[in-house]
Image: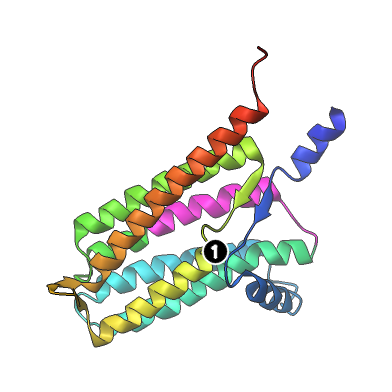
Amino acid sequence: MEEHMVMQKVCPHVRENRSILAPLEKKALVWMAERLPTWINSDHLTLLGFIGMLTAGAAYWMANRNRLALLLAVVALGVNWLGDSLDGTLARVRNRQRPRYGFYVDHVLDLVGTGVLLGGLALSGYMSPHLALGMLAAYLTAAAEEFLATHVRRVFRLSFLRIGPTELRVILAAGTLYLLYQPRVRIGDWGPFLLFDVGGTLAIVGLALKVMMCAIHNARDLYNSERLPQ
């Protein structure tokens, strides 16, 4: 029992990432982590990722007046990926892990950063404010379900249907670049609609599907593992 408690303190949960880009991404991150200067630590990278997300939100807001700010948003998303993905890898490569501290700080900043990002989109003119609010509500619901599942199952799943944070950044960056060419799209005979309204609607549906499927799966497994005696 005492050994089990020690293990939980050292490693409170296991990370699971089955996204499409995960194998390639892992090799690239380890390669970079092994070559970073010693004066750079995980906290620096976490802060870099947070600044990248804040900058992306500000860039979308500025795009309401100058659409070339969309290019800054794409660069900022890349900076966010670098900091947010490399901080944990660097800690593992250097064996300087603080799993509970890292998990808490990383996800608090993710919640704040995502709120700023969607706020920027709501003010950009490229997405309807009510769609941005709906996306924020869906994201927070999915995040809450994942945090609860991590607590009770000790597994933090980073992907759903082979799509993870990196793939979402790639999709968002590609859509942002497409805005420079065509901010509106037609769906058959319907439209035109704002491109990001269509994307936001699909994102809300996807997040709602994730919450429902994961909630059913986790509740079923927990029920079976904690059956009451007949």
Give the residue furthest to the right: 3
Residue beneath the point at 40% across and 53% down:
207
Indicate the position of residue 150 as horizontal and vertical percent values.
60, 42
Indicate the position of residue 19 as horizontal and vertical percent values.
58, 65
Neighbor class of circle 1 (other Cα within 10 Å; few <14, some 14-19, many 20+) is: few
Is residue 106 found inside the magenta-colored segment of the image? yes
Q: Which residues are magenta?
A: 95-115
Residue 161 relative to residue 55: left or right: right
Whether 184 is drawn above or below 205: the answer is below
Is residue 129 found inside the magenta-colored segment of the image? no
What's the amino acid at mark 1? Arg
Residue beneath the point at 20% across and 74% down:
64
Residue 216 relative to residue 87: left or right: left
Residue 54 relative to residue 159: left or right: left
User: Could you say which quadrant of the image residue 202 lies in?
Assistant: bottom left
Whether 127 is drawn above or below 2: the answer is below
How is the protein colored in the picture? rainbow
Give the residue furthest to the front: 230
